Image: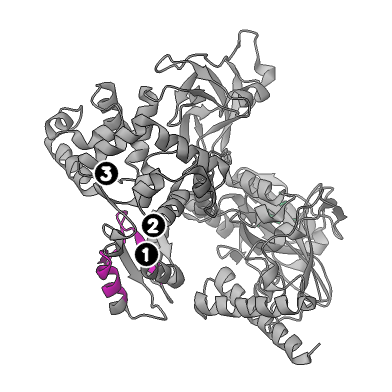
Amino acid sequence: MNEDIKKKAAKLRQALHRHNYLYYVLDEPEISDAEYDRLMQELIALETAHPELVEPDSPTQRVGALPLEKFETVAHTIPMLSLENAFGEEEVLAFDQRVKRFLNTDSPLLYTAEPKMDGVAVELVYENGRLVEASTRGDGYTGELITLNIRTIKTVPLALLNPVSVTVPSRLEVRGEVFIPVEAFKRLNKERLDKDEPPFANPRNAAAGSLRQLDSRITATRPLDIFCYGVGMVTDLEFSSHWEILQSLKALGFRVNPDIKPRATIEDILVYYRDLLDRRHEFPYEMDGVVIKVDDLALQRRLGEKSRSPRWALAYKFPATQETTRVLKIDVQVGRTGALTPVAHLEPVSVGGVTVSRATLHNEDEIKKKDIRIGDTVLVQRAGDVIPEVVKVITTKRTGVEQPFKMPSTCPVCGAKVVRLEQEAVSRCLNANCPAQVKESIKHFASKGAFDIDGMGDKSAGQLVDKGLLKSYADLFVLDRATVAGLERSGEKSAQNLMEAMARSKQISLARFVYALGIRHVGEHIAHVLARTFKTLAALMSATAEELMAVDEIGPQVSQSVRAFFENPENRRNIERMLKAGVKIETEGAAAQEPLAGETFVLTGALESMTRAEVKARIEALGGKVSSSVSRKTSYVVAGKDPGSKLDKAKELGVRILDEKEFIEMVSEK
Ligand code: IVH
């Protein structure tokens, strides 16, 4: 083959590796996304024309490969040990004393301390700078080969950078923790709920489940990330301290936690621990403690290890987020789609500083599997913002009076018959007018991604339904002010605010409208796909199953559900009533004039292809507003190069962030 083409492919690969690193690991891109895409497209074109050029570490190869039958196992060259745990300052000080005694020294020692990540430990093996193998920790001696899955993680280098400061070793084993950042976890679970899939209990389970997929194409869709914190066997390199290892890993292109405390005395490490414990919820990832490591590697070697853990390291854990308590009773809640969810009422207990008095039990099978009975003593856990859940029953505490739970055969709210379909884990109340379902569907209708009616939450919706003033969301727009003001704890002012919020919300995009309807299996994303494809409500309502199925991303399940919804006469009547009451749906055609109406943008950093004035003019021309500060009301933050603190604020508030490419797509598509 032509040497020039080979060289060109190698050059492109190298450039893409570098830009990938700058973008994902350092978060400091040097080129625009468009430029990156161009390079990627160029490499794909070359590799398609010359398939023999494709190498496993090419940046084009991250998408996931064909499913495996099962995972192979692999022995770690050096065992992956675990850590001794400590739960209080005395234990940490005792550890420091023990280390000093062992080393026969009185002088203060330096420790490097890092957040203990709550994820999955992995080992990555590089030969001559290329990722050749990745495995789980397993039992510490042998793990499972998960190379294909690990390759899909964008912050894992497929090829090492070639820094001047560090020789690229012929073999390098790197250890780290794979995890899912908190915000990404919330998004993942929201998407799963929208798709009627069971949510993950916590980010750790989600990370573990994602890495355990035999089909790496599934793993590729999960927002996995990694922090590297150590090495196994390494050739050609000599390190003198743990901190130096971390710096070298960084130089080679690995992601290293930026919140590490380097080389400090044990007293300073205690201060660091208290600070992290205080602020743990401000970090974008979950941690469950601090790992304290003797920094000097010569001292580490002298200290050696006990049977399962090194003498030179200690995990100083945060107070448990699991506690035991008692199940007082089990209630059943009815959700928007009629799904019955059993909920345990618990004797209140403080779990990691938050009082927990309820836990979701998910469904009937889950209760059976864990054999949870009323009166049982159970272990409950809370992780991040996730609803607390029962981990297991402490069966040794049983006295014999505990009562098994039985799913009711009629709806606890409306008394209608409850049905459990064969292929489903959940039981459902089939009465669409069930007040519980109506309340939930109104809350959904008024939620942020739908009509976004401020003030129509749990309380107002609940009271309006209970008083018989709302029978469906279609009644919202005929509510009058006096009725609203008559609600409990609702003064003139809040009634006025709610009326104004409702009036404002009447002008709505087709996508939001479709999402608001609460059609099963139609989450925010699918609603957008439907709106983009059918452009008007009328077209969508009359689309046949075949027409729906022909749309990319729409399968038989969504198609059936959409058809069933629009064929239901009551749903059609509700839509008509809303339109009569003044709801104005922007069709894609008419929306062409003002597709961004009602959306507020905040700009930060510079865009490559447009000046700030042009960006502002474009947004305003499409009906949007530009504001200078980020708040919960901001719809989008457009982040260009060198963004400022507005970006942090947006992340903190969970405001959608658009990069240049996404923004250009948004303003040119319409
Ligand atoms: S060092 C011999 N550093 O904790 C030292 N471990 O209980 C080995 N972990 O399996 C580990 N964050 O999954 C180290 N910054 C960190 C860590 C960390 C999380 C996990 C790791 C390991 C477990 C040991």
Type of residue at label 3? Asp
What range is drawn magenta here? Answer: 615-639
Which residue is the site of mark 2? Answer: 655
Note whether 523 is above or below 36 in the view shown.
above
Seen from the viewer's position, the closer of residues 115 and 16 is 16
Type of residue at label 1? Val
Q: Position of residue 591 (x, y in %)?
A: 30, 60
| Residue 514 lies in quadrant | top left
Q: In the rendering, which numbered label is found on residue 637?
A: 1
Q: Specify the quarter for ligand 1.
A: bottom right
Type of residue at label 2? Val
Residue at the image position 66 percent from the left and 24 percent from the top: 370
Note whether 242 is above or below 236 in the view shown.
above
Q: Are marks 1 and 2 in contact (CB under 8 Å)?
A: yes
Residue 638 sits inside the magenta stretch: yes
Note whether 22 is above or below 198 in the view shown.
below
Residue at the image position 27 percent from the left and 43 percent from the top: 453
Residue 628 sits inside the magenta stretch: yes
Considering every residue shown, the one lying at the far top of the view is 401
Q: Position of residue 621 (x, y in %)?
A: 25, 70
Q: Alpha carbon of mark 1 to alpha carbon of mark 2: how far?
A: 7 Å
- For numbered disc 2, what is the local secondary structure? loop
- For numbered disc 1, what is the local secondary structure? strand
In this image, 330 relative to 146: left or right? left
Which residue is the site of mark 3? Answer: 454
Q: Are marks 3 and 1 in contact (CB under 8 Å)?
A: no
Q: Position of residue 634 (x, y in %)?
A: 31, 58
Q: Position of residue 68 (x, y in %)?
A: 79, 52
